[in-house]
Amino acid sequence: MIFPSEHLALTDSETLEEVLECLAENFSIKTQGGFDQQTLFEILVKAASSGDSIENTAKKLKNVPTANDIRYHLKKIDNFCELETQINQALKSRIPLGLKNNSLKIASDLNLICYYGQPTTEE
């Protein structure tokens, strides 16, 4: 059976929900003050997915803890290399079985030059 491609894609919000659920199931960081673990994970995922700093991400988002509060909670983590390995394993465990066992054809179009033509002159 062939499914329409619109049913095979996750939206941004569905992807975020899936990642946050996976993190909450596999990791626990005790928080205190005005935010919870879910908020901490959301800020970290937002910063990581946009390639931004925690400082700038916290400034952009409304009603979130300061970057100092976030760093305070991150200082509780002893071994970031081990944590990275655990997170990668947890995320890999969520890959659907059909994707794990089959090779897929993937195409990518990368455009590093923003404009190929010549600008038009206005008269």
Image: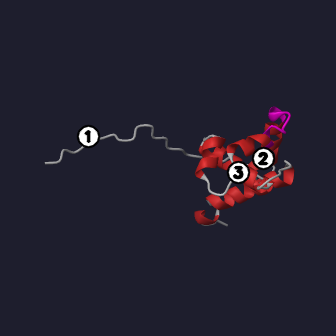
4 vs 33, nearest the viewer: 33
Alpha carbon separation for disc pair 1 and 2: 45 Å
Residue at x 18% of width, y 44% of height: 121
Q: Earlier in the sequence, mark 1 or mark 2?
A: 2
The image shows residue 13, relative to residue 116, as above or below, that is below
Residue 118 shows which numbered tag? 1
Residue at x 53% of width, y 44% of height: 108
Foreground tag (1 vs 3): 3
Is label 1 in contact with label 2 (beta carbons under 8 Å)?
no
Residue type marked 1: Gln
Q: How many marks?
A: 3
Residue 45, given in percent of the width and then of the height, sits at 69, 48
Name the residue that disc number 3 marks.
Answer: 65
Residue type marked 3: Pro
Is 60 on the left or on the right of 99, as rendered? left
103 vs 24, nearest the viewer: 24
- Residues packed near mark 1 inside 10 Å, few (<14), some (14 to 19) or many (20 plus): few
Residue type marked 2: Lys
Name the residue that disc number 2 marks.
Answer: 92
**Element type at marker 2?**
helix
- Residues packed near mark 2 inside 10 Å, few (<14), some (14 to 19) or many (20 plus): few
Is label 1 in contact with label 3 (beta carbons under 8 Å)?
no
Residue 54, given in percent of the width and then of the height, sits at 66, 42
- Which quadrant of the view contains residue 18? bottom right
The boundaries of the magenta stretch are: 73-82
The answer, for residue 15, to whether it is visible in the render is yes
